[in-house]
Amino acid sequence: MPQRAEGHFEVTGDPQPYDTVEGVTLARSRLEKRFHGDLQGASDVEMLSAIAGDTGSAGYVAIERVSGTLGGRSGSFVLQHNGTLLRGAPSLTVSVVPDSGTGALEGIAGEMQIDITPEGHRYTFDYTLEAVE
C-alpha cells in the first residue's frame, strides 16, 4: 500500500560553471541536503545543469543518495532527478532508482515531489516498501 512522507529540507552547495557558449552555461554541482519531517536524514547530490541565459529556461539531471529513517525504518536509497524549466515553467520527475534501497529500506520504490516556496524547500514523497526475497 502506498505511503506518503512530507517535510522540508535544506540544501547547501554551489554550481561550478565549466562551459558557456552563446549564453548557455553548463555547470556541475555537489550538494548536500538535510531532511526533516517524515523523512529524517541527509543526502549527497551530484548534479549537471544547463542554463539558457536570461530566458528562464534550464535543465538538470542529478543522482542523490539519501540515508536516514523513513516510516521508522533506517537505510538508504537513491533518487534520480530529471528537471526542466521552460521559460520559468517547471517540470520535474524525481524517482527512486529500482533496487537501490539498503537496510530496512530495501525494496523501496516511489516518486518525490519538490516544491520551492518562500519558506524554503518542501518535499512530498509517495513510496511503497516491498518485501525483497
Image: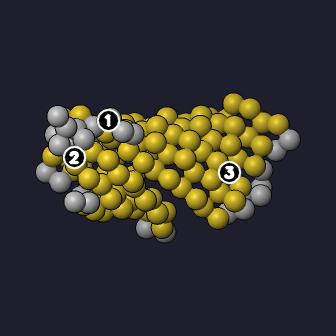
Marks 3 and 1 close (CB-CB < 8 Å): no
Whether residue 75 can be seen here = no
Taking the spot 69% from the left edge, 59% from the top edge, the residue there is 86
Mark 2 residue crowding within 10 angstroms, few (<14) / some (14–19) / many (20+): few
Inspect the image, locate mark 3, and give the three-letter code of the amino acid beneath it: Ala
Disc 3/disc 1 C-alpha distance (Å): 30 Å
Taking the spot 13% from the left edge, 51% from the top edge, the residue there is 72
Secondary structure under the numbered disc 3 in the rendered image: strand
Q: Which residue is nearer to you in this view: 78 or 13?
A: 78
Q: Which residue is nearer to you in this view: 130 or 112?
A: 130
Secondary structure under the numbered disc 2 in the rendered image: loop
Residue 130 bears which disc, if any?
2
User: Is tag 1's residue or tag 2's residue first in the polypeptide sequence?
Assistant: 1
Taking the spot 74% from the left edge, 32% from the top edge, the residue there is 19
Residue extending farthest to the right is: 22
Residue 51 vertical placement versus 98 (above, below): below
Mark 1 sits on what residue?
A: 99
Mark 3 sits on what residue?
A: 58
Residue 105 vertical placement versus 87 (above, below): above
Secondary structure under the numbered disc 1 in the rendered image: loop
Taking the spot 32% from the left edge, 35% from the top edge, the residue there is 100
- Locate residue 76: give its quadrant: top left
Q: Position of residue 73 (x, y in %)?
A: 15, 46
Inspect the image, locate mark 2, and give the three-letter code of the amino acid beneath it: Glu
Disc 3/disc 2 C-alpha distance (Å): 35 Å
Disc 1/disc 2 C-alpha distance (Å): 10 Å
User: Is tag 3's residue or tag 2's residue first in the polypeptide sequence?
Assistant: 3
Whether residue 61 can be seen here = yes
Between label 3 and label 1, give the one nearer the viewer.
1
Q: Which residue is nearer to you in this view: 109 or 116?
A: 109
Mark 3 residue crowding within 10 angstroms, few (<14) / some (14–19) / many (20+): many
Residue extending farthest to the front is: 133
